[in-house]
Image: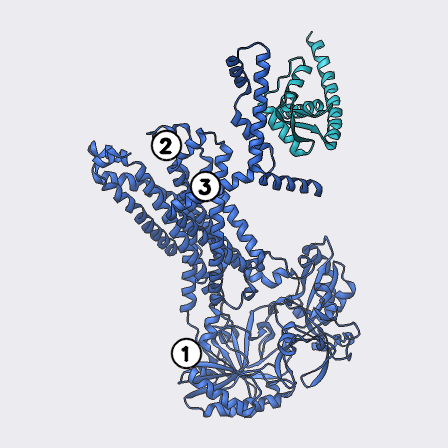
Chain colours: A cyan, B blue
Amino acid sequence: MPPSTDLLQGTLDLLILQTLVPGPMHGWGVALRIQQVSKEVLQIGQGSLYPALHRLEYKGWIQSDWGNSENNRRAKFYSLTATGRKQLESELETWERLSAAIGLVLGQIPEAEA
Amino acid sequence: MIGEVLRRFRFLVRQSLMKRTRQSDLDEELQFHLQNAIEANLAAGMPPDEARRQALIDFGGVERTLEQCHEARPGWWLGTVAQDVRYALRGFRRNPVFTVTVIATLALGIGATTAVFSVVDRILFRPLPYAHGERLVSVGLVHSLEKQEFALGSFFFDWQDNQKPFEAIATQGTMPHACDLVENNPAQLDCLSFDSEFLPLLGTPPVLGRNFTPEEDRPNGPRVVIISYGLWQGHYNLDPGVVGRLIDVDGSPARVVGVLPRDFQFPTLESADVIFPMALDRAAQTTANGGFGTPMRAFARLKPGVSIAQAKEEMEPLFAHTLDTVVPPVLRKDMHLGVRSLRDRETQDMQLTAWILLGSVLAVLLIACANVAGLMMARSEARERELAVRSALGASRMRLIRQALTESTLLSLAGAVVGLALAVGLLRVFLHLAPTGIPFLERAGLDSRIALFTMLLSLVCGALFGWLPALQTPRVVALAARAAKSRKRTVLRRVLVAGQIAVSMVLLSGSALLLKSFQNIEEQRLGMQTGGVFTVQIPLPGFRYNTGQKQMDFYLRAETVLRRLPGIHAVAISDSLPPGGWQGDYRYSDLAVSGKPHPAPGTGGQVYTRRVTPDYFKALNIPVVRGRNFNEEDRHSGESLVIVSRLLADLMFPGEDPIGKRIQAARDPRWHTVVGVAENVKNGGLVEPDNPEMYFLRSNVADFWGERAPLMIVDSVLSPKATAPWVRSQIAQLDPTVPVKIETLNEQVSKLADRPRFETALLGFFALCGLLMAVIGLYGVIAFVAAQRTQEIGLRMALGATRLDILRLIAGEGVRLIVLGGVAGLAASLAAAQLLKSLLFGVGPHDPAAFVAVALLLALVALTATLVPARAAMKVEPVVALRYE
């Protein structure tokens, strides 16, 4: 497996957790929200979304309950658990450190190239 | 951590309970997603059909997502394992011949390995049953007459006071001696002594009661004993009240203070029922035993981090100092310091045999695994199409490999279970065959350690033969209906078969050498008659027969009554018997001849001595070649007479007449007159060279009877079986309480050959197993190749090849493998035979006859295995062959 996949997978987890902060949401909502917030840059296909949701649920970071959607259809709503919140905090921290570090590195490369 | 495990467990349980709903939940969830996507598309203004189509395209493969969601759960693979197992079992049921063959082959390999391992484990690997057993050593003196370390009082106390490399040092008596338990249920027991440091050194406290206190371990201390578990069980019914009880040993009371653990093992591997304190008198050590001090066995525990070599080095100056003070210069050169690990002390002479047995049985196992690998490969070849289909349907490569490994693991576990059962039987056979000299053999059994070994072994086996075929992943071409089978695949199988032949060659040549050596041992002349001769051993209780006079009186009366029995030709009394076992000895250099210079110290080797009555030579039919035999009058004359063996006569009196010469033995002022020369007798055991021998007359003087319990040698024209009851009743009339042990000389000699017999039988058995499996493997490959080339054969015949050409074509394959394996095997055998060198008697490790015979046997059997399928190929009808497939 190429090493970048780990990063991507971790990132998707982070995105999902962050999306769920305001409140419970179903899978479609999560995908839509990420797409909107990222201004259509991040398109999450169901093929990676649902396995990720199930994985996070198994890890105990999110939990699921059946409920009714805005158009009154049965849907599965995911919400953050206490562990999930803590995990999000620590992942955010890691992410910021990481992106800052990457930014530092990348910030120099364009100059050198330019 | 525990919370995490519990959570996972709960999840698993819930998951399996709700499997159905979960599946439909997932469907529903994805359905909801799809609906939302369609609605979003509609909202974006697409027509309904297009909205649905586009949503489905965006959505991607539903099944794959389901699968991935499934795999994101813990334990999802458990389900696939069950699937794999079910699938494998179905496959096995469909092909019972294959399954049974594989399991039987594995069971044979694993069973034999398990049985051998259970025997050699205690000799080579299992930790000694002591605390810090790996740091325990046997320390003491060794000299040419005693190769096992022993300590002497004069040395020991110096060591105890001044040694540095050891944490603790302790002693036990040199060997157990007979003693009597005199109670309402009397018994003859073995008594031994050890000091109060002994049990702490070994780290095994008594199971009941306590160890000796230092006060009890002093001269004239209280008379206390520790008893064995066996005695506690057999005599006192495990009564805890035995501690503190007074028991009567040899006619005087002793208080029991402790009981040894059930599996207690003396470091000398001897057994004893009653143990006294050593109670060494330190002051007396300078005078006891001619100034050397009491002989004993000393054991010590190395300080952590000190190696045996270091310990020996540190002890050398101490040893040299005592040697110089105590031992006369003549003897010093012959005495050395010995420090050996306790494992070596216990099992050194068996370690080579143990390694050889283990090595050969592992070779058999390797052949078995190679065979099974060959079978598995043939099977996977046949299933190639099926595997290709599964692969095309989406089974990942890992999944296919796992399937193959599941199959091989199942097979090897089944093989292990059957193998364990087989091992129980094999172990019985081993015990039946085995010589008494193999330590721990009677304790060998299949305990949990052995079972674990077997399971691990089978898993390793399974991995070995499972990976090989599994690595050959199905190629896409296999899907094509008439794809040519590649020949590359069989290369691995051919290598395996050649390897099997090579390994069998090694096993066969080893066993051929041992067989030849064993024959040499059996056929050699002993120099005495063994048929019709039996020995009578009567261990007299020492406390009632406490003087030489009493013992002599008993044996002389026994001699008289036995002589009166019908069919008795001769009755002799001696202290020992050739060809093996304990025999008295002197250094040649300790013997002085009147009127001759003393031989240089340390020259001439050992001289065996025996103290015999005149009938000895008659009973064993040893001719007296010069001079005369002892006679009955000599026994009363009080003269000191000896007969020397021809070997000793040649050594001591080269070119002279030994008759009438006088010999003096070390530290004994008496002179002995030579009256005769007896023919040589095999006396160094069956395989060692003979030693010169000197027979002292056992005259009717009490001095000669008190030392070592003599044995009576009876030559009878009737069978020993018929005579034995009479002998027993006659002895019982003299003293009804003494035990009588009767054994034929043939049995005793046969026992000496037990070990070579054991080695030969086992190695021979392994070699035959190996050969059988290698031949089956060879047959399999050739038959497979022949079947694969059926079409080609048909074509060749259609083009004019004769049947002989075909035979040559197919058999050529086999011959190539045989030659390849045979040559490699020969090279390996020549190297391996070196290891056997010390076990061989009268045959060199590179004995040409043995190697030629083995090569011929192997070639013959292997050729047969090749010719059978080759002949079948030859008889193929071209028309049938061309239509094949």
Disc nearer the start of the sequence (3/1):
3
Q: Label 2 vs label 1: CA separation?
A: 68 Å
Q: Determine whether label 2 and label 3 are within 8 Å by CB.
A: no
Answer left or right for A88 relative to B269: right
Q: Residues within 10 Å of mark 1 (few under 14, many from 20)?
A: some
Q: Can residue B149 be spotted in the picture? A: yes
User: SS for tag 1?
Assistant: loop
Question: Which quadrant holds residue B448?
Answer: bottom right
Name the residue tied to disc 3: B87
- Say which quadrant the C terminus of chain B sits in: top left
Q: Position of residue B10 (x, y in %)?
A: 65, 41
Compared to B132, does B564 lie above or below? below
Q: Label 2 is placed on what type of residue? A: Ser
- Foreground label between 2 and 1: 2
Q: Chain of mark 3?
A: B
Name the residue tied to disc 1: B531
Compared to B789, does A69 lie above or below? above
Q: Position of residue B237 (x, y in %)?
A: 64, 76
Q: Label 3 is placed on what type of residue? A: Tyr
Tally of numbered tags: 3
Q: Label 1 is placed on what type of residue? A: Gly
The residue sitting at 64% across, 86% down in the picture is: B184
Compared to B515, does B709 lie above or below? below
Q: Label 3 vs label 1: CA separation?
A: 66 Å
- Foreground label between 2 and 3: 3
Disc nearer the start of the sequence (2/1):
2
Q: Position of residue B127 (x, y in %)?
A: 63, 57
Residue closest to the eye, B263 or B844: B263
The residue sitting at 51% across, 16% down in the picture is: B53
- Say which quadrant the N terminus of chain B sits in: top right
Q: Could you say which disc has been placed on residue B486 in the image?
A: 2
